[in-house]
Amino acid sequence: MLDDWRHQSWSSIVLELADAEVGVISASMISIEGSRHVELNPERRRRWGGVCKIAASILFAMLPLIAGIGLAEPSLQPISMDFDADPAGAPPSEWKKDAMAPDSDVSFTTVEDHSEQGGKSALLTVDGSSQNPVGAASRSFDSTSYRGRWLRYRAAVKTDAPVSTKIGLWFRANDLQKNVLVFDNMSDRPIRSSDWGFYDIVFKIPETAEKLTVGVLSSGKGKVWVDSATLTVLQPEEAGYDPPRPLTPRGLGNIESFAKLFGYIRFFYPGNDVESSSWDDLAIAGVGAVEDARSATELADRLQKVFATVAPAVRVYQTDRPLPAERPAPDPVGAKRIAWRHYGVKLDRSGRIPLYKSERVYLSAGDERKPLNIDLGGGVSALVPMSAIEGASGLLDPEYKVGPNTLDKPPGFRPSGADRTTRIADIVLAWTVFEHFYPYFDAVKVDWPSQLRTALARAATDHDDDEFETTLSLLVAALNDGHGYVASVYKPAFNVSIRWEWISGQLVVTGITETLRKSIAPGDIVAKIDGRPVGELIREIEPLVSSSTTQWRDTETLRRLATRKDAKPVLLQVRHADGRVSDIAVEPATTATALTQSSQHPPTEEVGSGVWYVDLSRITSAIINEHIADWSNAKAVIIDVREYPAPDAISVLAHLSPTAIRTDLFEVPIFTAPERRDVVYDGSGSWKLEPVSPIFKGKLVFLCGGGTISQGETIMGMVEGNKLGEIVGGPTAGTNGNINSFQLPGGYAVIWTGMRVRKLDGSRFQGIGVLPTVRAERSIEGVRAGRDEVLEAGLKIAAL
């Protein structure tokens, strides 16, 4: 189905996969067909269901999340890790090897016949009977002395492995609880060369880090030689990171002009591939090239040079000195003209989101797709071809000349939110995607050019990657997109293991883990978190939440309120039912640790005479098979869609009506011109469920609320549009449709809605959702008494 993915913090996927048994993880296990996946418990599915299929794009980066060996003594002096002192044929001292997939045969030995510096090197050999054997070597260090410092792990590497094998250095920092704090293994830039070359990984060590582990990894068969490894403390400028400083008015205008032209060329100039990571490098290089242009003449010249290698037919000029009119020559007889056609837009480099496509297509006869004259601001304009004759010289240049080596950065530079240039480039990259492809600007009243200026100004002065993540979140929040989310793929997320809801103006505990039952009870009110009033914290979080409705903003705000950046204990001031006030320390857990369900009922049970309750968030095929006869013969069935549906939930709907049940209208936008002009929609993604016996004979009642989003809203849209029964509770989130995603330099993943959904009658869905026919909500007294007033309201209707 089209909408069965929900956004999940990419960092939480990192930890989820890390907590799985490393030996059974391979790239083939997570696929779009879902042939094998890491199962989420119902509570996590409610919040983040479905997007694990996207996780395969970063799966390789998770493979060596294994423990290192004993810790070396800390030192702020460079640590040399060559292998000259180790006997040939013996394992290098202080290193360990690991076979990280079934049937992997791994060795790590000191050798004399290969060395970068004329002595000895170490050889990692990975073989085995499995299709994709995985092996790694690692060495660990105490990290306490490095906290808050920048570290560079550098080593010389060469390999004879085939192209299908991914080779990389890897680097990890863990806290005292062994949570992964930062991680990189060059998954996005694997080593291929059979000649010696130096490779770097640079990271800032978190303040809670206890252990660092460095190493080399081979995902696939092959030999990898490593030598001259070092671990060195760097100053930020040594890592190539420009410090924060404000943009001047002229500099801001220059980058605005660059951003506008960048989007036009990247997505509509008919010569290059929109997915290529070289666009990331071009954005970083372009920001550095144009910011300090002092005049329109200088800006036009620099823009022309920045884009010369990827768009040689573009002409940049001063607006007050227009290009002379040219009469285009007629196309040669039989020539085929091509242009971009974006079905949505394809930005996910992993290939794990197959719905969206971007391709150059042949234009029909008479479709000239003329060049566009674009006023870029700042006194400059550009003439950008929108089509080209297939194979025309000077228009199509598939070989990029811009790459990491062309950046004005030191060798081994790794884009980071700590770098001003990277931050500004990321805003350019993100803003242009939404400028040309966000499907709901007709429903969202936002000054998008003004959002660009605001985000650029903030990015220039952000002091670190955390501040910049906030800036990105504010930009995405302006879209009012309930799927909109920004996460760092390099950082874990931790959760306070408590379920809470906003009831009667209070933050009320509705679900807890067994370990907290002695100190906190459902119905307790959380007044402060780490000494700060809850209301104050909520006011800080709300502007960062992208949402088209207040009910989803409330739901998502409370989820983020429970999310922490580290595992430090969280101090809650709790007011109990008897009036006592307690300060309770709660240790956050990684998002791989489940939050408990607050439901007072099993997934299904008879809750009244002939009345059955079914919770679609916890339903399984086994439960369906066991109880389908009970449900079909019941006087009434109450179906709970307040939480995110389980994978088998949709099959229940086929039993609800003797006629086919239709979905809302799922429409993929087709873009052939910039700024969403002339957009048309493909509605073929809408679908219907044919009836399946046995059909439920009794009354149907459905429960929903502000946490009902995406696939849950697909179900509720079918209920509403096909008039299947009464709807009890509150309005749904108002966000549905397949997500899209892209990743930005510095490791930021951005998720958003890539298509339009309308109600079955053609009316607007975004920002409205499904409205209840009977309003009902929970109370603090009800929570304390173990009651579910929304379900009770459904029972009253079922009994009529």
Image (tube, rainbow, N blue to C red):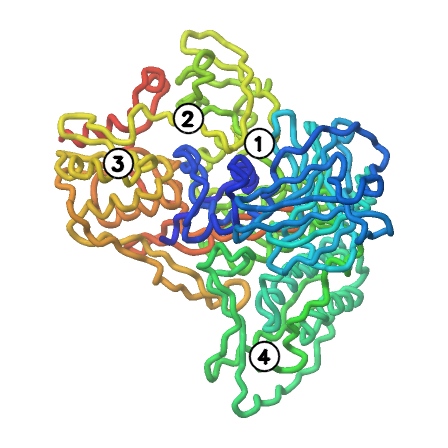
User: Which residue is under mark 2?
Assistant: 596
User: Which residue is under mark 1?
Assistant: 540
Left or right placement of residue 408 versus residue 380 in this view: right
Mark 3 and mark 2: Cα distance apart in space: 20 Å
User: Which residue is under mark 3?
Assistant: 623
Which element type, helix, strand or loop, lies under badge 4?
Answer: strand
Dot 1 amino acid type:
Glu
Q: Position of residue 575 (x, y in %)?
A: 47, 13
Mark 4–mark 1 contact, CB under 8 Å? Answer: no
The residue lying at 54 percent from left, 81 percent from top is 337
Mark 1–mark 3 contact, CB under 8 Å? Answer: no
Q: Of the residues under marks 4 and 3, which one precedes in the sequence?
A: 4
Instruction: Name the front one of labels 3 and 2.
Output: 3
Q: Of the residues under marks 1 and 2, which one precedes in the sequence?
A: 1
Which element type, helix, strand or loop, lies under badge 2?
Answer: loop
Which element type, helix, strand or loop, lies under badge 1?
Answer: helix
Label 3 crowd bin: few (<14), some (14–19), many (20+), radius 10 Å = some
